Image (tube, rainbow, N blue to C red):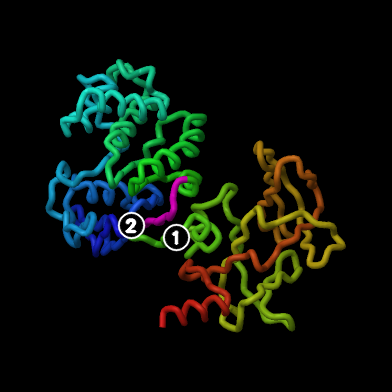
């Protein structure tokens, strides 16, 4: 069953189109993350779903019912936005309880619900405090608790962990999916943090310029980005992007790195002599012995340990930078000449002119067949 349907949504502010013919279906019980850079339209879309603002075109359907012209308070949603929107004259307890109070729930039901969600969010010790006495992180968790306490069927969360400290943010990435799953709510979650998107989303909708550029599972977005910009947005360290012009060899298409051939299995004649960009995730590159088949010579410039991994900056023979990531504690060269091994099957190829990912011939044929 589909909980939310957005059909051809358009939103303009004066001459600027913020949401451009956007359509989206969200299944019952699904956690969908809206991800993208600042200004991509994520928060505007969330407020439009909530009924805080109206679309200039298109329809919003919730549970199969057209809610496009229905006021926010009658949509039955839970909401937590970046600006907290807490009542300053009310304690944290009363702010959280307001969702239940409006339903005229019993005192015992309200108290039990507030204390349960407050404990989960680690704010049960500040329930008697007013917003002015709370830290930004506590305010954000209070707003989140208020959205959660009523167990709404559709929950809208606008970057609710932005102002919490790093330790709690990490903990909440683990706890929040369990909490949301236990409630059985359908969740629309906005974030600019790709790690948060990967951790919390059943699917991720990547937004840019008021449109959805790609939608899929976290694994699909990371392992099969639709274009260069999406590839850049996911990954730390960022993906290596190198301008290349594929050539034809006896074993198929290849590109050159440090005068060595890197085969691109699966690609056909359509990429030969085409201006392309080669994408290599740092974790798919490994240091190798000089005698290893296909080893590519590089010069190691610097090494940076990052707790769970070590990132190395290397240069090709032509001076192009390549980042190599390996698990912490794994041996590797610190400086000077070295060799790397690159698996062409793990490489991405993008059209330099459009930025779109070029699919290997076999995958492209399969997709064309599905479309037909």
Q: How many labels were placed on the picture?
A: 2
The kind of secondary structure element at disc 1 is strand
Measure the C-alpha gap from mark 1 to mark 2: 12 Å
Q: Where, quadrant-wise, is the C terminus in this rendering?
A: bottom left
Q: Position of residue 86 (x, y in %)?
A: 25, 28
Q: Is residue 174 above or below residue 30?
A: above
Seen at 48% across and 70% down, the residue is: 353
* Mark 1 lies on residue: 216
Question: In front: 154, or 116?
Answer: 116
- Percent of width and height locating residue 340: 76, 58
Q: Residue at x 61, y 77 (%)?
A: 267
Magenta region includes residue 99: no
Q: Which mark is residue 121?
A: none
Query: CB of mark 1 within 8 Å of CB of mark 2?
Result: no
Q: Residue at x 28, y 48 (%)?
A: 46
Q: Is residue 138 left or right of residue 259?
A: left
Q: Is residue 204 magenta?
A: yes
**Numbered range of the magenta stretch:** 200-210
Q: Which residue is mark 2?
A: 26
**Image coords of residue 133 (percent x, y):** 32, 16
Quarter of the figure with residue 348: bottom right
Identify the image quadrant of the N terminus: bottom left
Place of residue 205 in the rendered image (x, y in percent of width and height, measured from the top left): 39, 56
Closest to the observer, 178 or 72: 178
Of the pair 342 and 247, the residue shown nearer to us = 342
Q: Earlier in the sequence, mark 1 or mark 2?
A: 2
Q: Is residue 321 above or below residue 355?
A: above
Judged from the image, the secondary structure of the residue bearing numbered disc 2 is: strand
Q: Classify mark 1: residues with Cα within 10 Å, few (<14), some (14-19) or many (20+).
A: some
């Amino acid at each position: 069953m589909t909980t939310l349907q957005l059909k051809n949504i358009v939103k303009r502010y004066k001459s600027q189109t913020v949401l451009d013919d956007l359509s989206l279906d969200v299944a019952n019980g699904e956690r969908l993350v809206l991800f993208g850079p600042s200004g991509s339209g994520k928060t505007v879309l969330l407020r439009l779903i909530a009924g805080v603002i109206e679309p200039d075109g298109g329809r919003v359907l919730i549970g199969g019912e057209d809610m496009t012209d229905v006021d926010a308070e009658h949509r039955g949603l839970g909401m937590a936005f970046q600006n907290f929107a807490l009542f300053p004259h009310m304690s944290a307890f009363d702010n959280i309880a307001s969702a239940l109070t409006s339903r005229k729930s019993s005192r015992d039901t309200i108290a039990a619900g507030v204390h349960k969600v407050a404990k989960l969010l680690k704010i049960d010790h500040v329930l008697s405090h007013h917003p002015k006495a709370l830290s930004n992180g506590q305010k954000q968790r209070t707003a989140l608790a208020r959205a959660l306490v009523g167990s709404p069927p559709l929950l809208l969360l606008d970057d609710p962990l932005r102002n919490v400290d790093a330790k709690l943010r990490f903990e909440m990435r683990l706890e929040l999916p369990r909490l949301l799953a236990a409630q059985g709510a359908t969740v629309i979650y906005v974030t600019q943090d790709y790690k948060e998107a990967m951790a919390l989303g059943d699917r991720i909708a990547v937004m840019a310029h008021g449109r959805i550029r790609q939608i899929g599972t976290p694994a699909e977005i990371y392992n099969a980005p639709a274009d260069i910009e999406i590839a850049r947005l996911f990954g730390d360290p960022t993906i290596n992007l190198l301008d290349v012009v594929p050539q034809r060899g006896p074993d198929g298409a290849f590109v050159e790195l440090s005068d060595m051939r890197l085969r691109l299995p699966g690609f056909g004649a359509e990429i030969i002599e085409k201006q392309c960009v080669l994408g290599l995730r740092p974790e798919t590159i490994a240091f190798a012995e000089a005698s290893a088949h296909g080893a590519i010579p590089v010069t190691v410039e610097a090494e940076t340990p990052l707790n769970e991994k070590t990132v190395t900056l290397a240069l090709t023979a032509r001076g192009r930078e390549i980042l190599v990531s390996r698990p912490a504690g794994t041996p590797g060269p610190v400086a000077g000449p070295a060799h790397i091994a690159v698996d062409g099957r793990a490489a991405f190829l993008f059209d330099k002119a459009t930025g779109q990912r070029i699919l290997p011939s076999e995958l492209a044929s399969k997709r064309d067949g599905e479309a037909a």
